[in-house]
Image: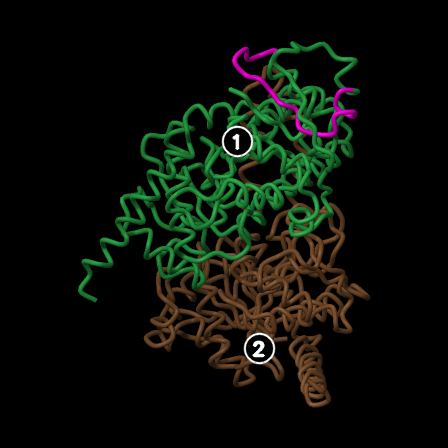
Chain colours: A brown, B green
Amino acid sequence: MRIALDAMGGDNAPEVTIEGAIETVSEKEDIRVVLVGDERMVSEALKSRRYPPDRISIHHASQTVSMDDSISFAIRRKRDSSIRKGIDLVKSGEADAFVSAGHSGVVMATALLVLGTSEGVDRPAIATTMPTLKERFVLIDAGANVDSTPENLLQFAYMGSAYSKHVIGVEKPRVALLSIGEEDVKGNELTKEAFSLLKNTSLNFVGNVEGKDLYQGDVDVVVCDGFTGNIALKISEGLAEAIMKMLKVEIASIATGRLAYLFMKPALKNFKKKTDYAEYGGAPLLGIRGTCIISHGRSSAKAIKNAIKTADLASRLRVDRIISDELSSLSRGMKTDLAGSPA
Amino acid sequence: MRIALDAMGGDNAPEVTIEGAIETVSEKEDIRVVLVGDERMVSEALKSRRYPPDRISIHHASQTVSMDDSISFAIRRKRDSSIRKGIDLVKSGEADAFVSAGHSGVVMATALLVLGTSEGVDRPAIATTMPTLKERFVLIDAGANVDSTPENLLQFAYMGSAYSKHVIGVEKPRVALLSIGEEDVKGNELTKEAFSLLKNTSLNFVGNVEGKDLYQGDVDVVVCDGFTGNIALKISEGLAEAIMKMLKVEIASIATGRLAYLFMKPALKNFKKKTDYAEYGGAPLLGIRGTCIISHGRSSAKAIKNAIKTADLASRLRVDRIISDELSSLSRGMKTDLAGSPA
């Protein structure tokens, strides 16, 4: 597989992205990476490193999207950005997938513009996997859209379920709706309407899941609008960090703190490994024609490597086709239902 | 002060509520508690306990609202519930405040029905205080309303700011809007409109706060709709619990785990104390005529005691009047603005 990587995206680009690309090709012989970005900067950073030259190449892009750029500005005025050029490579078939740790809003808008949505999909969505007390679950939408309709949520549910089944390997994914009570009458207008749509599908819909139960690991797919999903994701990240900081402060403040810390260090390391997003390789943008993986802005080389591996897997499995098959049959089904409905 | 306590509300009522009432009156001589609930059950539970009989009394209510009752059912069919009777006591002036660890939706709807909103307030909101790396902040609305307008959010901001200033003692509370980006153009339709209202107020509005920064402790009041607020609150509770469980599992699984646990135990205790909701005494329902404190369903006796103390403080400070003063001048100001506006 040939993966286009946004060499300029992320807090420590291009050093970290290049390092991630080199780590990937050293581990997986069947992956080639195209580093998309400023040719001079990228080749300069590559110079001091050892890598297989037949499996790492550079594709020049004269512009870089900054995190402060508005989406519309980046789309209109940065047509030669590493994001745009990378997605163009997917469109032309020169790359099988695109990975970026850059401006996720711009990646999403550019993918929508250049590649378009899959058949039957109105809006793409970001699917993030999250750790729990048991297995990981898929949170969809984690922030691709700010305002959603009940029909959007229904489509997110199908996309998340397909991803859970075909990529994560859950046979019959339990799909839940993130809301503020377990009963179907609980929630806001959006979730109440989405609930009534979801309960009449072939999905393994298990009802609402409340915030307090999210990390129990009893569901495989959690559906919500992108505003709520992004807040849920970011609060979780921020709180986990804050708790670890608070615990360290408390441990440092007691007499036996140094000893405790020494004895628990391997446990902290295991915990970090289980909860570290860097281990889990980015979030796919589902519902577009092609494979796009959005990686965390703070991505380490390991996170980039795992995102490239996710891109490789999603591309080999043709996740975009699986989703378009699911969704186009859903939309045909809905049309038939409507046509056949007496009301 | 005379506080009406829903003796039947919460997971372990009436034992825990009665215990909380007795603990309160033993600590604070100027508080009297009226236990509202089934007279036979309450007096039975009181029998084996020692308490000052002049400062604990029983007010009979023949019905109890169950957590499974819908709000409309409870309002229409349980007019003799401990929630209704307790709030009636506030209305008639026989109690200065009401505290309940029962069905928060029913408490909120009953308070709205019996006491009504303060002048200038369209919708009451639940204000919860949350721990951070620095000081605590007020989250408003934590779940009183499921769908909100930008104007509702503006009112929540004023109520939260007044509460932070007058009850918590923050001189110039920094008010922020919970959203998915720091810039004013980031967010959904609701938060973008609320942002433009908030920046033209006399509040110390500091802009959007993202989920990841919520626990940094850099703001004093976080404004959001009740759906988002409830999810933020419950995810935080659930995640904190899950992290502690995961850490314990990791610590138990390493060779030095028992020693580490032994040495860090005092630190865990300090951490728990700082983050335990039981220490912080319930969440006031702001924007109604009177004082109502909603306590966690899982409240311990200590949580009930602290909720009664919060009720006592809020009632002594006349928080409801402070809020109606703030909000009525706001609504007069808005009318003046509109009248004077050329557009």
Q: Nearest to the eye among marks 2 and 1: give it.
A: 1
Q: Name the residue at 59% across, 31% down.
A: B99
Instruction: Say whether residue B258 is left or right of residue B137.
Output: right
Seen from the viewer's position, the closer of residues A92 and A74 is A74
| Highlighted range, magenta | B26-43
**Occupied quadrant, residue B287:** top left
Whether residue A267 is visible to the viewer of this picture, yes or no, is no
Query: Which residue bears the numbered disc 2?
Result: A288
Q: Is residue A324 visible?
A: yes
- Mark 2 falls on what kind of element? loop
Q: Label 1's element? A: helix
Distance of label 2 from label 1 (alpha carbons): 61 Å
Quadrant placement of the C terminus of chain B? bottom left
Residue B127 versus residue B58 in the image, above or below: below
Q: Percent x, y for residue A294?
A: 54, 64
- Say whether marks 2 and 1 touch (CB < 8 Å): no
Q: Chain of mark 1?
A: B
Residue most extreme to the right: A171
Please say whether residue A204 is one of the residues in the magenta stretch. no
Image coords of residue A112 (percent x, y) = 50, 77
Residue situated in front as seen by the camera: B290 or B59: B59
Residue at left offset 56%, top offset 80%: A117
Task: Return the mark for residue A78.
Answer: none
Q: Residue drawn at (39%, 53%), measured in percent from left and top?
A: B182
Disc 1: CA contacts within 10 A as few (<14), some (14-19) or many (>=20):
few
Which residue was labeled with disc 1? B92
Name the residue rendered at 57%, 27% in the picture: B307
Is the residue at mark 2 from the same chain as the one at mark 1? no
Amino acid under disc 2: Ile
Farthest residue toward the front? B92
